[in-house]
């Protein structure tokens, strides 16, 4: 349980947040400069607030009325900042071990946590490297491992804006899905709606001044509204699941998302049945048809039911459910008009067309 | 080759400079850290007082120390009661060197502490480490270059200290006569050749010292590059 009721004066406005949450993973969205990072810093104890209180699992971290301000080292709140902030004078091993020395005297337990963090974040091969020699994605992974190794009761993660342009293999999301599976409670700042849906049980949209909306990610991320307040927002379909079959002659594999359905993906040597995988395809790369298709080269034609139609400035975003799997597709206003996809098209059956090559693997 | 007398002067000088530098290291690190963290009022005043030995004539500092430490002085009287004699002993030389070189240690070190990214320090706290722990394992190692520079400057200053030393320790051969005092004494008594040999010796010592430090700091800096 996280309880936040704070007033935080920033340069241009005062951020007022009053929120309680039982969620394991919270996605925090909103435009740059709306106070997301500042809010994380308040929870971590790195920034003072004018008035208010912060509680985690009933324990008071900050309470201006009661004059309580727990020191950052006692909060057990892990923080992964945008720029990773690795310690330049230590190698990766030293960085990850930094927090182990003071968290409990049990060395076997801290050794176990170190090994676990290294394994989950797959940084074993990096342990002897220096921070300056790492790529952006590797740095994020090391910073996450460093925070995770201290067994925090809450993990705060600020996604770098550069992550939007990062290569797929650099993205940290697949690792976050694993951390989430460990039931580590987290707050994750992102600009990617797909990531929020894949990771979080709750989404909070922050706007200059306060909370704009919150609730289950699919409900909250009312696309048009979000796109108008955050120009950097991205809509990616993110599917986490496993490989169920492989066709070597064809060079393809069958991927089964955990939420349901089957997809044909390009087979790489390591994609064998049983392997866990995360695939992504951006909303722009999902084609929409209002009639069943014949003679299409694309291998994935999914029958789906429209759950929402959201009009943006130039484009229309569709949400549709195919065999239990929620999809986002983006079409132009003209295309939406000619297909008769208006706001009242909810419940209509459509076909989503996804090329094998458009499904790209995150890890 | 060096004569036995020259060698003993060299050893005495090096011994005193090393002792003086090591003696001011803990206090210098602590002082620099406090100055770096302390943003409240009085910071400027403390800094100015700490820097005084840099700008005062060394003889003035020496005289002041002499007044304090002489048997009639406030500190000297207490020390005398304990049976400790300072004035005109090697301890006086160390004290003179320590006083004169202290600001040279503190200044670069404080600058180095200031340059450690505050967000890095804050982040280290979230990993469960207290402020002193973070200082010891993050701030200090990251300020390595400032520490080496400061210690080197202090050591060099101690090697060449003259004005304050001659006032409270005199120039007693075999006891308080360091290289700079010996050069002065030789030159004054007309033994120019001996003075030149000793001067040459100081050049060698200084060169070796600077070169080693240069090697250490450039290598370390390459490793710290981000």
Image: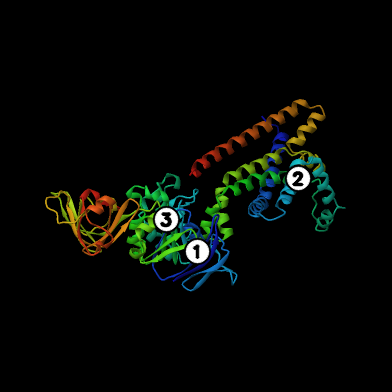
Q: List the residue tagged with mark 3.
A: A229
* Distance (Cα) linking label 2 and label 3: 57 Å
Q: Which mark is residue A155?
A: none
- Regarding mark 2 in the picture, which secondary structure is present there? helix
Tell if the residue under mark 1 belongs to the same chain as the one under mark 3.
yes
Residue A244 in sight from this viewpoint: no
In this rendering, the label closer to the viewer, 2 or 3:
3
Residue furthest right as drawn:
B72
Closest to the observer: A171 or A92? Answer: A171
Residue A195's spot in the image, x, y percent? 34, 58
- Which circle's residue, 1 or 3, is located before the other in the chain? 1
Q: Residues within 10 Å of mark 2 (few under 14, many from 20)?
A: few
Q: Are marks 1 and 3 in contact (CB under 8 Å)?
A: no
Left or right, residue B184 beside residue A115 = right
In which quarter of the view is residue A52 placed? bottom right
Q: How many marks?
A: 3
Question: How busy is the neighbourhood of tag 1: few (under 14 within 10 Å), some, or many (20 plus)?
Answer: many
Task: Kindly indicate the quadrant of the structure image that contains residue A320.
Answer: bottom left
Of helix, strand and loop, which one carries label 3? helix
Residue A197 at x, y = what percent? 33, 61
In this figure, which residue is indicated by the disc labeled 2?
B52
């Amino acid at each position: 349980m996280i309880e936040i009721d704070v007033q935080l004066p920033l340069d241009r406005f005062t951020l007022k947040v009053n929120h309680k949450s039982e969620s394991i993973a919270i996605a925090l969205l909103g435009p740059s400069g709306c106070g997301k990072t500042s809010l994380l810093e308040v929870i971590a104890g790195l920034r003072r607030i004018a008035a208010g209180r912060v509680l985690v699992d009933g324990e008071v971290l900050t309470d201006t009325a009661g004059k309580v301000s727990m020191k950052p080292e006692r909060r057990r709140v892990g923080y992964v900042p945008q720029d990773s902030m690795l310690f330049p004078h230590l190698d990766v091993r030293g960085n990850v071990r930094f927090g182990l020395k003071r968290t409990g005297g049990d060395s076997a337990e801290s050794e176990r946590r170190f090994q676990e963090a290294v394994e989950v974040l797959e940084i074993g091969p990096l342990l002897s490297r220096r921070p300056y020699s790492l790529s952006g994605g590797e740095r994020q992974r090391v910073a996450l491992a460093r925070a995770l190794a201290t067994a925090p009761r809450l993990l705060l993660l600020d996604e770098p804006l550069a992550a939007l342009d990062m290569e797929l293999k650099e993205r940290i999301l697949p690792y976050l899905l694993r951390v989430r599976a460990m039931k580590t409670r987290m707050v994750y700042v992102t600009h990617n709606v797909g990531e929020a849906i894949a990771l979080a049980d709750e989404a909070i949209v922050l706007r200059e001044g306060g909370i704009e909306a919150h609730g289950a990610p699919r409900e909250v991320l009312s696309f048009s509204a979000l796109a108008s307040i955050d120009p950097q927002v991205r809509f990616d379909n993110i599917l986490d699941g496993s490989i169920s079959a492989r066709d070597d002659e064809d060079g393809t594999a069958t991927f089964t998302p955990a939420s349901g359905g089957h997809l044909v993906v390009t087979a790489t040597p390591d994609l064998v049945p049983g392997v866990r995988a995360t695939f992504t395809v951006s909303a722009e790369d999902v084609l929409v048809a209002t009639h069943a298709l014949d003679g299409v080269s694309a291998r994935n034609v999914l029958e789906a039911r429209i759950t929402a139609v959201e009009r943006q400035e130039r484009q229309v975003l569709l949400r549709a459910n195919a065999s239990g799997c929620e999809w986002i597709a983006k079409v132009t206003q003209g295309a939406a008009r000619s297909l008769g996809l208006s706001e009242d098209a909810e419940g209509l059956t459509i076909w989503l067309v996804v090329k094998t090559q458009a499904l790209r693997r995150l890890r | 080759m060096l004569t036995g007398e020259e060698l003993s002067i060299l050893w005495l000088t090096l011994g005193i400079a090393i002792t003086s530098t090591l003696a001011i290291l803990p206090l210098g690190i602590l002082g620099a850290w406090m100055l770096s963290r302390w943003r409240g009022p009085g910071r400027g005043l403390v800094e100015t007082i700490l820097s005084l030995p840099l700008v005062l004539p060394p003889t003035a500092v020496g005289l002041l120390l002499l007044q304090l430490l002489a048997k009639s002085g406030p500190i000297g009287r207490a020390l005398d009661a304990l049976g400790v004699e300072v004035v005109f002993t090697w301890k006086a030389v160390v004290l003179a060197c320590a006083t004169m070189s202290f600001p040279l240690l503190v200044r670069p070190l404080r600058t180095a502490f200031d340059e450690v990214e505050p967000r890095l320090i804050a982040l280290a706290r979230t990993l469960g480490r207290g402020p002193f722990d973070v200082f010891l394992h993050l701030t200090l190692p990251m300020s390595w270059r400032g520490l080496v520079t400061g210690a080197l400057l202090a050591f060099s200053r101690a090697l060449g200290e003259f004005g304050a030393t001659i006032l409270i320790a005199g120039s007693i051969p075999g006891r308080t006569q360091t290289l700079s005092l010996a050069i002065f004494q030789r030159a004054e008594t007309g033994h120019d050749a001996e003075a030149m040999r000793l001067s040459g010796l100081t050049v060698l010592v200084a060169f070796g010292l600077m070169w080693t430090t240069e090697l250490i700091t450039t290598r370390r800096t390459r490793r710290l590059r981000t």
